[in-house]
Image (tube, coloured by chain):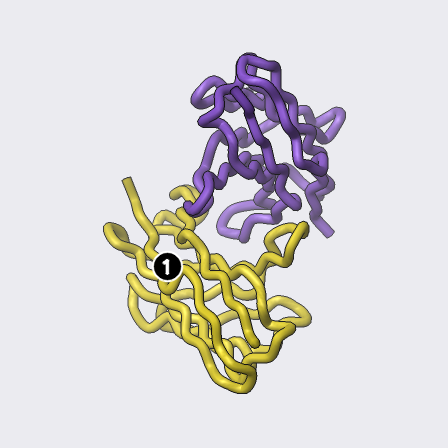
Chain colours: A purple, B yellow
Amino acid sequence: GDSVTQMEGPVTLSEEAFLTINCTYTATGYPSLFWYVQYPGEGLQLLLKATKADDKGSNKGFEATYRKETTSFHLEKGSVQVSDSAVYFCALRPSGNTPLVFGKGTRLSVIA
Amino acid sequence: GAVVSQHPSWVICKSGTSVKIECRSLDFQATTMFWYRQFPKQSLMLMATSNEGSKATYEQGVEKDKFLINHASLTLSTLTVTSAHPEDSSFYICSARGSDRGHSPLHFGNGTRLTVT
């Protein structure tokens, strides 16, 4: 079945460091790919998405490119801030109105 | 922006009692709601999909008689954990989508942490 694998955390970085959180997926067909973020005490929020191969999603300085050849959707940010500390979830949606399939989440801690 | 309110945010109950978790869409009509469960250090696992006015569709391995889902209106879905046991302790989170099937974004509640003693 469809699945998402993302790097295990926690990830601890200093402020202004470069961030990469790896995400790979297994799916039939052409899924849409998402990154969700969960800040402390809050619900999940959509961070960015890509709906087809080679699309790049971006938001708040974060980017991820839909790579069909490597079945990956790695999350990157050039310079992290303390406020980026959160749990990040990679997810896919197989098609249409189907529910999301999530990775396990990666906790990011950014220290000043 | 669209908001999903989930209540309560945390609850502690005794083994054998039932707990109801509410999920409300505050400024849009949610034709579809999903209920997820998250165990520590594991991914969000889909429990069931509910469409307003119809019975919920449960994922394999989820006991429908234990996890009762009601989606009686376009703004409210409830999950009732019946006869709770310590192994039901987990983080439950709902998500809701508007009426534009597959195209409108998914909005999440803040989640409910259930502890059964």
In front here: B91 or A59?
Answer: B91
**Residue matched to label 1:** B6
Residue B7 coordinates in the image, percent (x, y): 36, 63
Residue A87 coordinates in the image, percent (x, y): 55, 38
Residue B114 coordinates in the image, percent (x, y): 51, 67
Say whether residue B102 is left or right of residue A54.
left
In front here: B38 or A66?
Answer: B38
Quarter holding the N terminus of chain B is top left
In front here: A53 or B41?
Answer: B41
For residue A51, what is the image quadrant? top right
**Is B105 located above or below residue B116 in the figure?**
above
State the SS at label 1.
Answer: strand
Query: Which residue is at 58% across, 35% downward?
Result: A33
Query: Which residue is at 47% across, 17% downward?
Result: A61
Amino acid residing under circle 1? Gln
Host chain of mark 1: B
Query: Which residue is at 50% across, 37% downward?
Result: A37
Determine the residue located farthest toward the left in the rendered image: B27
**Is A66 located above or below residue A105 in the figure?**
above
Residue A75 coordinates in the image, percent (x, y): 60, 25
